């Protein structure tokens, strides 16, 4: 807890801050815990639990100037976040693109054939977007995402079980694998593993074992490193029945679909987005999406139509570079 408050608070100001924190605490059912309020504000848990009700320091709560300083800063930050959130347009939901159709077809074929599939493209081509939509709209499809340092058997197996609704599963790898096999047996389902380039040799081997034991479809999704990773595992690579690999940039149709999702129909704006997406070396659709979001926010705040300059400014703000 800081020892030097930014200013001196009157008793009336402190009572107002206490009322705001009490209201914040009671926004949820059950009310937010004192531990949560302590984490939010940086105050000591026992102190905030006595200060808000007014019992702190034998009822002379107004003598403490440190807690109200922390509370005021928290409330100011919260208000600023709320104001910004209200201004920032929501990213449109899933819209099928040419590329997403190909990726989802890989998933469908792998499951139908009871084989393994691979999706490998440069970042920003919509892999995760398509995989999540496929998983959400099909039955018996479960998905986990790996990361650097989190691609070992335990990471993969617990992630898949969490996707199946079995949160908090623990135990040796053999037990976890057995449970996944039990869940996938006889259901003609599929397992999607995103960021699969981070899978360890033993982690990928567990996926092969699950596939062999159940006949379920397994789709490995990752960046341009993934084909090289799989070639280092002949038993895994030989089981590939379908793939979508080598795409480095979004298709022009993908950009058109994204623009339409944002209600951008002006040919000049669409052409600018197409041109920009074609020259972005990393993060195509994702970068374009965030650039559009900032551009729309700026134009909306000024009550006018979106312009090419807005898009340029949005991309420049997002990436600290000219677009």
Image (tube, rainbow, N blue to C red):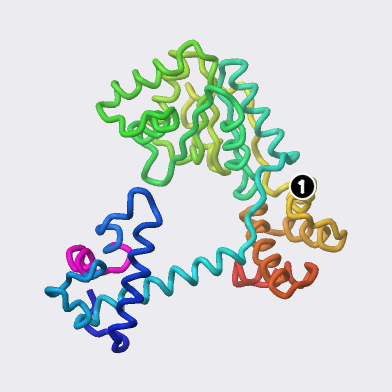
Q: In this image, 221 relative to 315: left or right?
A: left
| Residue at position x 32%, y 83% in the image | 12
Farthest bottom residue in view = 8
Quadrant that contains the N terminus: bottom left
Label 1: state its secondary structure.
helix
| Looking at the image, residue 252 lies above or below residue 47 | above
Quadrant in which residue 307 is drawn: bottom right
Q: Residue at x 60, y 49 (%)?
A: 123
Magenta stretch secondary structure, dominant: helix
Residue 80: give x, y in percent of width and height: 49, 72
User: Residue tagged by mark 1?
Assistant: 257
Q: Which residues are magenta?
A: 39-50
Which is more toward the observer, 19 or 266? 19
Task: State the count of labels.
Answer: 1
Residue 157 drawn at (x, y percent): 37, 29
Q: Is residue 43 magenta?
A: yes
Q: Nearer the viewer, residue 90 or 237?
A: 90
Q: Nearer the viewer, residue 163 or 316?
A: 163
Tell me if 213 is positioned left or right of 4 in this view.
Answer: right
Q: Quadrant of the C terminus?
A: bottom right
Q: Residue furthest right?
A: 267
In this rendering, the answer to whether 51 lies above or below 126 is below
Q: Is residue 209 magenta?
A: no
* Residue at the extreme left: 58
- Identify the residue shown where x is 83% and y is 59%: 271
């Amino acid at each position: 807890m800081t020892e030097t408050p930014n200013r001196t608070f009157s008793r009336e100001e402190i009572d107002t801050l206490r009322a705001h924190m009490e209201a914040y605490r009671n926004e949820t059912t059950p009310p937010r815990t004192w531990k949560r309020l302590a984490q939010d504000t940086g105050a000591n848990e026992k102190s905030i639990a006595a200060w808000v009700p007014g019992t702190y320091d034998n009822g002379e709560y107004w003598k403490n100037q440190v807690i109200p300083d922390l509370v005021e800063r928290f409330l100011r930050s919260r208000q600023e976040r709320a104001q910004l959130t209200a201004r920032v347009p929501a990213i449109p939901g899933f819209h099928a693109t040419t590329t997403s159709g190909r990726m989802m077809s890989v998933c469908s074929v792998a499951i139908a054939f009871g084989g393994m599939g691979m999706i490998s493209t440069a970042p920003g081509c919509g892999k995760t977007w398509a995989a999540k939509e496929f998983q959400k709209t099909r039955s018996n499809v479960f998905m986990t995402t790996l990361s650097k340092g989190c691609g070992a058997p335990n990471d993969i197996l617990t992630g898949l079980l969490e996707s199946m609704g079995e949160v908090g599963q623990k135990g040796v790898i053999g037990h976890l694998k057995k449970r996944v096999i039990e869940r996938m047996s006889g259901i003609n389902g599929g397992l999607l593993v995103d960021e699969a380039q981070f899978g360890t040799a033993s982690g990928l081997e567990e996926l092969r074992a699950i596939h062999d034991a159940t006949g379920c479809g397994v789709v490995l999704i990752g960046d341009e490193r993934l084909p090289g990773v799989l070639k280092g595992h002949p038993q895994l690579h030989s089981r590939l029945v379908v793939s979508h690999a080598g795409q480095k940039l979004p298709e022009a149709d993908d950009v058109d679909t994204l623009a339409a999702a944002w209600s951008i129909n002006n040919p000049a704006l669409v052409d600018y987005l197409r041109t920009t997406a074609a020259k972005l070396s990393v993060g195509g659709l994702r970068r374009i999406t965030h650039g559009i979001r900032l551009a729309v926010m700026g134009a909306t705040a000024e009550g006018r139509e979106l312009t090419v300059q807005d898009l340029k400014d949005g991309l420049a703000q997002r990436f600290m570079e000219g677009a």
